[in-house]
Amino acid sequence: MTHSATTGAARGSLLLPVLLTVQFLVSLDVSVVNIALPDVGRDLGFAPESLTWVVNAYALAFGGLLMLGGRLADLMGRRRTLVAGFVVFGAASLAGGLAQSPAQLVAARAVQGAGAAALAPVALALITVHYTEGRARARALGLWGASGALGGAVGVMAGGLLTDWAGWRSVMLINVPVVLAALAVTGSGVPADRRAASSGPRPDVVGALLVTAGTSALVLGLVRTESHGWGSVSTLSTLAAAVVLLVVFCAVEIRGERRARQPLLRLGLLAHRPVLAANVFALLMSAGQFAAFYFTSLYLQEVMAYEPTRAGVAFLPFCVGVVVGTVVATRTVGRVGARVLLVTGGLLGAAGFAWFALAVGAGGTFVGSVLGPSLVASVGIGLCFVPLGTSATSGVAPGETGMASGLLNSSRQLGGSIGLAVLVAVAASATGPGRAGLADGYGAAFAVAAALLAAAAVAAGLLHGGAGRAEDAHARPRQRSSPSGV
């Protein structure tokens, strides 16, 4: 075997593990702090109403900058963007673990989100480019989706174990050795960029700033409804500013596209019905799913009086269900199509969260209030990741895979941020005195999460436009086969 063949085989064997590590890591850090929040609040002196910003700062920067990260991968090179993202993410994790005040921790979480925004779109883009359509890509997308979902669920488990054994700071510092290990294999595992960074057009920084400012204002307005009310001048002015900023963003992108520049988001991408359906579905599903993680962890600790480690282990059934759902989707997407799986998964997820809404209570038990709903919801969510990946990149040109990947990840993360803000307000409005009152508030939040998943299923059924197999047959020309032969 020649040296080049050996190198190619080694790269092929490492490519997918690197990409799965990326997806696992960025998803884990959305949820890993959830169980640690009470300890974080006590140690650093957070006000109760500002504690959610430990979660929101990451999610907002992540969601707001994902489209820029995806476009940077297209224009400046995927491996360069990946390495830069790892460096920023690792440095911010170290800073967060050493934070001495609420402001320092929130700032570190925001920078972490920026690093993650460079990482996440590269993973999906590289899968789209290096794995052929059909079983190879479906398997890679299934593992990609499972890594993201497991990262979120394992993040809750790891957060509990680390908080109990090593303190809340360890949930930030644990990222540092993982990032160093990933950097060590990226050079040999990820194909080199083919052109110099200076040869491409300038990225759309103005668009990135506008969409980040607009989404930040949107979530800020929603979060502040808990203390200011929905009809207050502060809330309405903040939401109005968000709308203006997002409208200006759309105008800037349309103008850039007409002048043959490189927009952050080519809005014509959403003319593909599978792409539109995938992003609407991801927005709605994440709005319910991310908030459900948050309220499940609170219910276990605040109502059922679980210690952090025990609360973390209680998420294990969710991990199992996601794996089951992803395996089923990987094996059936070629036969039944993306739309059927999205609708089925959305409805199962809705059923699981509705079960949560009915089962949580002051006298709840793990078997009666957590186990069954977790399994139903997680199998449904696991069914969705393969069809989301295939639909979001259906008909997309190779030079825009990063853009499409950034758009899908943006929809997921912005949905999570907005959903958390809205459901926190819903829970607060329905909460009464004592543990029973807390359970009432959490139940109301789960009911809204169920409605969001049901709406996602309806959107997929109406918008997708096909079973999912036809799109693959008529999409772009086939890319080269995976170097690993997966």
Image (spheres, helix red, strand yellow):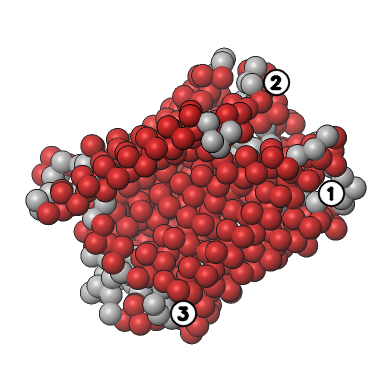
Mark 1 and mark 3: Cα distance apart in space: 39 Å
Residue that carries the numbered disc 2 in the rendered image: 42
Residue drawn at the location 63% of the way across and 21% of the way down: 46
Count of numbered circles on the image? 3
For the residues bearing labels 2 and 1, Cβ distance under 8 angstroms: no
Q: Is residue 458 above or below residue 417?
A: below
Q: Is residue 13 visible?
A: no
Where in the figure is residue 25, as x and y percent of width and height? 51, 44
Tell me the tag on residue 337.
Answer: 3
Residue that carries the numbered disc 1 in the rendered image: 361
User: For the C terminus, which image quadrant?
Assistant: bottom left
Camera-nearest residue between 433 and 291:
433
Q: Is residue 289 visible?
A: yes
Q: What SS does tag 1 mark? A: loop
Q: What SS does tag 3 mark? A: loop
Residue drawn at the location 60% of the way across and 53% of the way down: 289
Dot 2 crowding, Cα within 10 Å, few <14, some 14–19, many 20+? few
Where in the figure is residue 138, as x and y percent of width and height? 44, 71
